[in-house]
Image: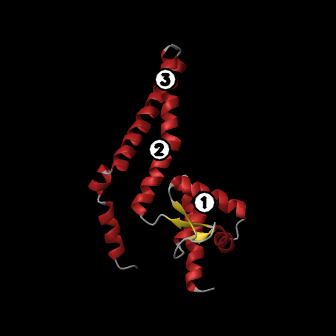
Amino acid sequence: MSEAQSVRTAFVDLWSRMGAFWGVPPMTARVLGWLLSKDGPQSADEIVAGLGMSRGAVSMATRELRDWGLVHPERSPGTRQILYRPETDFEKAIRNIVAARKRREWEPILEHLNEWIPKLERERSAEAIVFRERLKAISALVSETDAMAESFLAGTTLKSLGLKMIVRAALARPSK
């Protein structure tokens, strides 16, 4: 096995494990890691061969990655074959992940909390009062996280953090 293949395998395995931190299933993150390690867009058949996954698993993973905005399908010129190109603007990829998590997790939580808290206002038992206060605390935290995500997605937080500058500095640093 060449060094490039060895590093690719380790990178894909790491990406697969890290996917859980972003809310991306391991096999889906595995496909993204593999695509990121390749030069140019890849077909589903190439992904199947490269990762030893079933065609169905690759189809599900690429569909999910497309929904996250982390993969862009393209038609192969002159054929009906679809090629998958990973998002390589990592600032955009992070924004896409935050937007998807916001849409899939934080907004539904807030919707339910906003429905449940008023219902508990009518309850006077000690247990209901404690429960309502805990739901309010959760709502406040999720609302603050949601507001930070909105700010991040709007670009205001990102500009103040200087993510692009941090990435450029990290790339310029000599590796250990």
Q: Is residue 53 visible?
A: yes
* Depth order, front residue of 162/100: 100
Q: Residue at x 49, y 23 (%)?
A: 117
Residue type at mark 3 is: Ile
How far, Cα to Cα, is label 1 from label 2?
Answer: 21 Å
CB under 8 Å between discs 3 and 2: no
Mark 3 Cα-neighbour bin, 10 Å: few <14, some 14–19, many ≥20: some
Q: Which residue is mark 2?
A: 102
- Based on the displayed image, in which of its 4 quarters is residue 74 positioned? bottom right
Q: Position of residue 66 (x, y in %)?
A: 55, 56
Label 3 belongs to which residue? 117
**Residue drawn where x is 53% and y is 67% of the image:** 85
Q: Is residue 158 left or right of residue 118?
A: left
Q: Position of residue 96 (x, y in %)?
A: 46, 53
Which structural element holds mark 3?
A: helix
Mark 3 and mark 1: span between their CA atoms?
Answer: 39 Å
**Percent from the top left, x then y, of residue 134?**
48, 29
State the image quarter where residue 170 is shown.
bottom left
Residue behind mark 1: 62
- In front: mark 3 or mark 2? 2
Q: Categorize mark 1 by other alpha carbons within 10 Å: few (<14), some (14-19), many (20+).
A: many
Q: Please indicate, yes or no, whether residue 20 appears anywhere in the rendered image.
A: no
Q: Amino acid at mark 1?
A: Thr
Quadrant in which residue 144 is drawn: top left
